Image: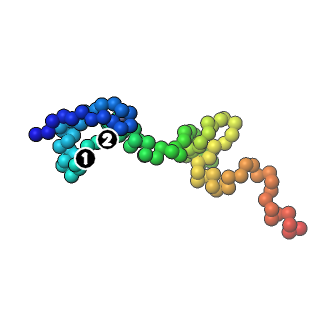
């Protein structure tokens, strides 16, 4: 029969209990070592490695072109149209159409 063990976390230095149930669980997975970190630090490491890097705040707005859901990385303001990624690609990502492109001026 397993008994609860008190171990010391190598990350935060706190004592934590490696319970008999956890020992059974470890044994059932074929693990013979003891955990070296407390549950808190284990959870913290898990979530830190989960790749929330690159996750940024996205704002949901209504696409000015198709009326669908548009997700933009900035706070949408009323004075500028917001496009979903589909429409944004079709428009070409350019701001305004006043530059007239290149090909219409050369053929005359
Ligand atoms: Zn810890
Ligand atoms: Zn759209």
Q: Which quarter of the rendered picture does the N terminus lie within?
A: top left
Q: Which quarter of the rendered picture does the C terminus lie within?
A: bottom right
Element class at badge 2: loop
Q: Residue 92: x and y, percent?
A: 68, 55
Q: Residue 98: x and y, percent?
A: 80, 51
Q: Which is nearer the eye, 107 or 74?
A: 74
Q: What is the C-alpha distance between the residues marked 1 and 2?
A: 9 Å
Element class at badge 1: loop
Q: Quadrant of residue 79?
A: top right
Q: Is mark 2 within 8 Å of ligand 1?
A: no
Q: Quadrant of residue 104?
A: bottom right
Query: Mark 2 packing: few (<14 Cα in 10 Å), some, or many (20+)?
Result: some
Residue reaching furthest left?
1
Q: Which is nearer the eye, 42 or 78?
A: 42
Q: Which residue is mark 2?
A: 36
Do callouts 1 and 2 mark residues in contact (Cβ within 8 Å)? yes
Q: Which is nearer the eye, 65 or 53?
A: 53
Q: Which mark is residue 90?
A: none
Residue 72 placement, left or right of 91:
left
Q: Residue at 69% of width from left, 40% of height from top?
A: 80
Query: Mark 1 packing: few (<14 Cα in 10 Å), some, or many (20+)?
Result: few
Confirm whether residue 24 shows in the render: yes
Q: Which mark is residue 33?
A: 1
Residue reaching furthest right?
108
Residue 76 placement, left or right of 46:
right
Q: Residue at 66% of width from left, 42% of height from top?
A: 81
Counting labels gives 2
Q: Residue at 80% of width from left, 62% of height from top?
A: 102
């Amino acid at each position: 029969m397993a008994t609860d063990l008190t171990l010391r976390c190598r990350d935060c230095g706190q004592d934590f209990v490696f319970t008999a149930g956890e020992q059974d669980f470890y044994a059932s997975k074929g693990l013979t070592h003891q955990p070296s970190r407390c549950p808190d630090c284990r959870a913290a490491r898990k979530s830190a490695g989960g790749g929330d890097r690159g996750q940024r705040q996205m704002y949901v707005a209504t696409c000015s072109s198709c009326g669908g859901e548009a997700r933009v990385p900035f706070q949408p303001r009323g004075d500028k149209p917001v496009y979903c990624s589909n429409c944004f690609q079709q428009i070409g990502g350019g701001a305004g159409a006043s530059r007239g492109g290149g090909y219409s001026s050369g053929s005359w």
